[in-house]
Image (cartoon, rainbow, N blue to C red):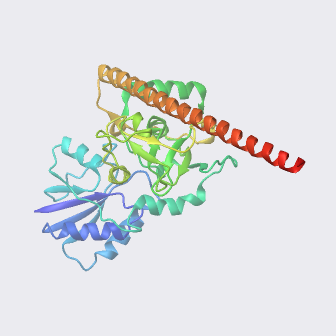
């Protein structure tokens, strides 16, 4: 059987090479199909030349530049000779499977420097625009939207409402919160979807060190305070999902940060609007009634969290009362000691 391995290869790196070699062990021939689209950090022709040089002496592997994008439906791979589409991108595989192709998921090779987003972050961080020094233990800045990696899908109707508000205000009031290392969108998926749809080149973000223990993830608001049997999401799963573009369903994760989420208003005209893009891959396939029910469940989560908070407040009030009593008792002892010292001095 023959396979085509699809990717943007922006830029090509050792992780790509090792993954392709693994695929070549399973198939008699592999076409490395270089597709177009964002993000782009090098010329597509240059990416093709690099991959051809790397596999020049491997007769089982050939390289083909493919016009257009899979996500936008402008790529045509029908003329190529293959039996199976292989990719580490779940989004691409879902699209092609719906079009009738046989698909196979290939896990990406893990390793330092084996992530395109990590490499692009090093390249494009130099072009980050800092608004002003408003840091409070984290970095607030504006970065290229193309460097961000989504984690969750978004609710269609909720997105439409947010889109109307942002367009009317002409302002993004609250920045997206991202992982500094991989640029994963930890908070603000709907705002991210808005920026992608409207082609904005830059995004206002708060960049955090995701390895910091003070930042954690759960799947219920009460997990801010309690760990129970329903606590099933980990940071490692978050990273793996985002890097493999295997998005969670809308409103799956709850991220908790050691700071308050406050407004840092940024005007849309600072973000450079471009051509609008198709974001169907970011939209959760949910009905309106499902979204309403999801909102009701989230309100129930808030109610549960308030119960936990009230229990914690009562606990702390008890501790405060106990400490005040301790102080009173110690002050009695201190006062008695001072009286005894004074009497001794008088005699």
Query: In the current view of this chain or complex, which residue is farthest to the left?
Result: 1
Image position of 340 (left or right of 40): right
The quarter of the picture where residue 269 lies is top right
Q: Position of residue 235 (x, y in %)?
A: 38, 51
Query: In the current view of this chain or complex, which residue is farthest to the right?
Result: 346
Q: Position of residue 307 (x, y in %)?
A: 43, 26
From where the camera sits, is residue 42 visible? no
From where the camera sits, is residue 71 visible? yes
Q: Residue at x 35, y 37 (%)?
A: 252
Q: Residue at x 31, y 37 (%)?
A: 249
Image position of 270 (left or right of 225): right
Q: Position of residue 296 (x, y in %)?
A: 36, 21
Query: In the current view of this chain or complex, which residue is farthest to the bottom?
Result: 57
The quarter of the picture where residue 34 lies is bottom left
Total numbered circles: 0
User: Quadrant where the N terminus lies?
Assistant: bottom left
Query: Which of these two is toward me, 274 or 121?
Result: 121
Q: Residue at x 75, y 41 (%)?
A: 335
Q: Residue at x 64, y 47 (%)?
A: 136
Q: Position of residue 142 (x, y in %)?
A: 59, 48
Q: Is residue 183 above or below residue 313?
A: below
Q: Is residue 240 above or below residue 150?
A: below
Query: Which of these two is toward me, 346 or 176?
Result: 346
Query: Which of these two is toward me, 303 or 18?
Result: 303
């Amino acid at each position: 059987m023959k396979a085509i391995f699809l990717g943007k290869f922006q830029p090509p790196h050792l992780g790509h090479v090792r993954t392709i070699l693994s695929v070549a062990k399973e198939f008699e021939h592999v076409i490395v199909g270089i597709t177009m689209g964002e993000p782009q950090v090098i010329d597509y022709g240059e990416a093709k030349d690099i991959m051809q040089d790397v596999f020049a002496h491997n007769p089982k592997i050939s390289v083909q530049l493919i016009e257009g994008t899979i996500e936008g439906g402008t790529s045509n791979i029908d003329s190529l000779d293959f039996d199976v589409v292989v990719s580490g991108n779940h989004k691409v595989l879902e699209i092609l499977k719906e079009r009738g192709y046989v698909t196979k998921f290939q896990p990406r090779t893990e390793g330092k420097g084996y992530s395109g987003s990590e490499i692009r972050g090093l390249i494009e961080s130099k072009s980050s625009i800092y608004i002003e020094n408003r840091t409070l233990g984290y970095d607030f800045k504006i970065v290229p939207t193309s460097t961000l990696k989504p984690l969750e899908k978004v609710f269609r109707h909720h997105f439409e409402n947010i889109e109307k508000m942002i367009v009317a205000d002409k302002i993004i009031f609250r920045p997206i919160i991202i992982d500094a290392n991989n640029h994963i969108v930890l908070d603000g998926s709907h705002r991210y979807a808005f920026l992608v749809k409207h082609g904005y080149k830059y995004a206002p973000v708060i960049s955090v060190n995701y390895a910091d223990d003070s930042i954690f993830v759960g799947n219920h608001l009460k997990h801010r305070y309690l760990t129970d049997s329903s606590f099933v999401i980990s940071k490692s799963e978050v990273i793996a999902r985002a890097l493999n573009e295997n998005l969670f369903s809308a409103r799956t994760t709850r991220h908790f940060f050691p700071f308050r989420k406050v407004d840092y208003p940024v005007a849309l005209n600072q973000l450079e609007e471009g051509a609008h893009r198709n974001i169907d891959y970011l939209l959760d396939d949910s009905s309106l009634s499902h979204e309403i029910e999801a909102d009701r469940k989230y309100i129930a989560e808030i109610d549960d969290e308030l119960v936990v908070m009230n229990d914690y407040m009562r606990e702390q009030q008890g501790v405060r009362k106990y400490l005040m009593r301790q102080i009173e008792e110690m002050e009695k002892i201190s006062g008695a000691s001072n009286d005894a010292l004074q009497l001794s001095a008088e005699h």
